[in-house]
Amino acid sequence: MGRTKSFLLGQASGLVEPIAGVIGAAFVLHMRSLLPYALCFAAGAMIFVVVEELIPESQRNVKNIDMVTMATMAGFGVMMILDVALG
């Protein structure tokens, strides 16, 4: 593929980004009341990924890995509740 065609195809692939950005911004403005819950769900999913995939040392030599993960999630939840309740 030539330089010009490669350049034009690269530019064409970027045309979707501003359109999707405007649609995403409109969606966020329309669903403003659900945004905190969606962000909480996303944060919980990321914490789950960190515990399940990025901290394998915490699960080494354990028969029930899912129980360890859920216990870590519960502990984090309790910590966050106490943080909010106690200031």
Image (cartoon, rainbow, N blue to C red):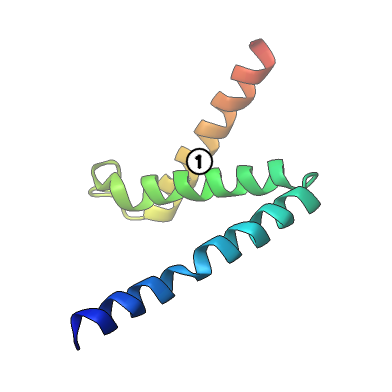
Asked whether the viewer can see residue 85, the reply is yes
Q: Quadrant of residue 8?
A: bottom left
Q: In screen coordinates, is 78 left or right of 48?
A: right
Q: Secondary structure at mark 1?
A: helix
Residue 5 lies, in percent from the top left, at: 28, 84
Identified at 54% across, 38% down, the residue is 74
Image coordinates of residue 29 in percent, x first then y, are: 76, 48
Residue drawn at (23%, 43%), measured in percent from left and top? 57
Name the spot of residue 64 as percent of width and height, x first.
38, 55
Please name whichever residue, 27 or 6, is drawn nearer the observer in this view of the structure: 6
- Decide which of 77, 43 is in the foreground and name it: 43
Quarter of the rendering occupied by the N terminus:
bottom left
* Quadrant containing the C terminus in the rendered view: top right
3 sits to left or right of 25: left
Q: Is residue 21 above or below residue 43?
A: below
Q: Residue at x 80, y 53 (%)?
A: 30
Q: Residue 44 lies in what quarter of the image?
A: top right
- Residue 30 against residue 79 in the figure, above or below: below
Residue positioned 41% across, 45% down in the render: 68
Q: Position of residue 2 (x, y in %)?
A: 19, 86
Outermost residue toward the bottom? 1
Q: Is any atom of residue 31 visible in this view? A: no
72 on left or right of 28: left
Q: Nearer the viewer, residue 56 or 32?
A: 32
* Front in this rendered view, residue 25 or 86: 25
Q: Is residue 35 above or below residue 79?
A: below
| Residue hosting label 1 | 73
The crowding category of the residue bearing disc 1, from other C-alpha atoms within 10 Å (few below 14, some 14 to 19, many at least 20), is: some
| Residue type highlighted by circle 1 | Met
- Residue lying furthest front: 4
